[in-house]
Each structure stands twice: as structure tokens, then as C-alpha cells.
Image (cartoon, rainbow, N blue to C red):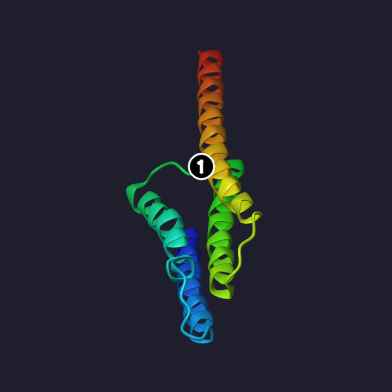
Amino acid sequence: MNKTALYYLFISLFCILFGAVYELFSHEVYSYFMLYAFVIPLGGGALPFFTMAFSGAPIPNRVSLNLYHSGIAALTIGCLFQGALEIYGTTNRLVSVYWVLGILFPAMAALTGHLFQRRCRCRKKERDDLDL
């Protein structure tokens, strides 16, 4: 979990640098989406994974982790893309796909994590019952 949290921390730093360089060359045009794109991997990635690492929380299964990472990536890329479009002075209706997927993937991760935990508990109970 520490390694994953560090990856998210580096992604946050990359978003800060990317936004700063992009806005440096944007002729004094700014976008809040570009400025605050680093908050998503920091708040949605680094902080929860550092918390899980230090609290000793159980590690989620691989399917849940992949869905969650995909959701954070979709939200981060969506913010950067929306920011670039705002700086350029245009819009695109396909940006909404990033927001939908960014919310849908973590929701599916929570659902699959809950289902797999429940299934694992049932299997463990069955094994314990067979051992008696």
C-alpha cells in the first residue's frame, strides 16, 4: 500500500508540474480544472492508500483495485483535458464521459470489494465448518 501511495504522490506532483508548465505558455489564461487536477490523485489515491498502509486495513482484491485506479485515472485525465479545453477557449461534450467513468469505476470497485469480501468470508466459514 505504501508503494501505491507513493505512486499517487508522484502523479500528483506530475499534475502540479504539468499544470504549471501548461499555464506558463497559455498567455495568462487559467483554468481551475488544470490548477487543481493534482487534488484527485492526492486525495483519492495517496491519502487513502497511506491511511490503509498505516492503519493495517485489509488489502482489497485485485479487481477492486484496478477499478478504483481506473476511476482515479479517468477523473485526473478528465480534469486535465477539461482544463486544456478551457484554456484553448472551446468545449467538447465528450468530456462528460470522463466524469461518468470516474464515478462509475470507484462505485464498481466498492461493490466488487464488498462482494468478494462477503464471498471470502463465506468460503472461510465453509472451510472452518469442514475442519470440525
Q: Residue at x 51, y 83 (%)?
A: 21
Q: Residue at x 56, y 22 (%)?
A: 123
Q: Nearer the viewer, residue 64 or 71?
A: 71
**Relative vertical location of residue 6 with respect to residue 132 in this rendering, above or below:** below
Secondary structure beneath label 1: loop
Q: Residue at x 55, y 28 (%)?
A: 115
Classed neighbour count for the residue bearing mark 1: other residues with Cα under 10 Å, few (<14), some (14–19), many (≥20): some
Say whether residue 50 is left or right of residue 20: left
**Relative vertical location of residue 58 with respect to residue 37 in this rendering, above or below:** above
**Relative vertical location of residue 45 with respect to residue 119 in this rendering, above or below:** below
Q: Nearer the viewer, residue 58 or 80?
A: 80
Residue hosting label 1: 60
Q: Nearer the viewer, residue 80 or 31?
A: 31
In percent of width and height, residue 38 lies at 45, 66
Quadrant of the rendered image containing residue 91: bottom right
Residue type at mark 1?
Pro
In percent of width and height, residue 82 lies at 56, 63
